[in-house]
Image: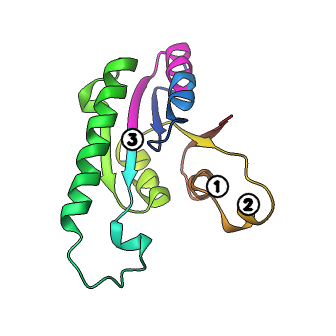
């Protein structure tokens, strides 16, 4: 029996996502684990400090729709069932923590750019996921 039965791979939708996904699929296969694919759409208001006097719900809906379409494409390419594709809205670190607990995940896989210096001090999603996770976290280096 493997230590990892359910693995959550959290991706952004950049061109580096397939690097993380390919490794996550291989790790899940080696452990005969169920793989969940997740993307967190950050609320549009966060990017602007919430001080924009306009309705951003249409833009938020477009971002959510685009994320669901991209996840569906990845799901098809990497053979991840639709019910295991999750798009949620919020702060990436806290949403990944919630998902990992709600779905009883044994391992969270995230990509990391290996930040240094001031970028490291400012933090990263991978670092935020690591701190506060109740399960193992694997940060895969993105080239």
| Residue bearing mark 1 | 127
Residue at horizontal 34%, vertical 65%? 43
| Residue 83 relative to residue 114: left or right | left
Mark 1 falls on what kind of element?
helix
Q: Position of residue 80 (x, y in %)?
A: 34, 23
> Which circle marks residue 105 in the picture?
none
Q: Which residue is mark 3?
A: 38
Give the quadrant of residue 91.
bottom left
Task: Determine the residue positioned at 40% across, 19% down.
Answer: 78
Q: Which residue is mark 2?
A: 120
Q: Nearer the viewer, mark 2 or mark 1?
A: 2
Q: Is residue 96 above or below residue 25?
A: below
Mark 1: few/some/many CA within 10 Å (<14, 14-19, 20+):
some
Specify whether 46 is left or right of 29: left
What residue range appears in magenta? 24-37
Secondary structure of residue under mark 3: strand
Instruction: Give the distance between the C-alpha atoms of the residues marked 2 and 3, in whole angstroms.
Output: 24 Å
Sequence-wise, which precedes: disc 1 or disc 3?
3
């Amino acid at each position: 029996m493997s230590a990892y039965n359910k693995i959550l791979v959290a991706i952004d939708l950049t061109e580096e996502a397939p690097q993380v996904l390919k490794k996550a699929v291989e790790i899940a296969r080696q452990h005969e684990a169920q793989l969940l694919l997740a993307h967190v759409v950050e609320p549009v208001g966060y990017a602007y400090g919430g001080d924009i006097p306009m309705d951003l719900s249409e833009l938020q809906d477009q971002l959510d729709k685009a994320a669901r379409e991209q996840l569906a494409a990845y799901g098809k390419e990497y053979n991840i069932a639709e019910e295991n594709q999750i798009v949620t809205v919020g702060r990436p670190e806290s949403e990944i923590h919630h998902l990992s607990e709600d779905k009883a995940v044994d391992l969270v896989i995230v990509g990391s750019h290996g930040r240094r210096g001031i970028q490291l001090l400012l933090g990263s999603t991978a670092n935020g996921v690591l701190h506060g996770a109740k399960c193992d976290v694997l940060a895969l280096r993105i080239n």
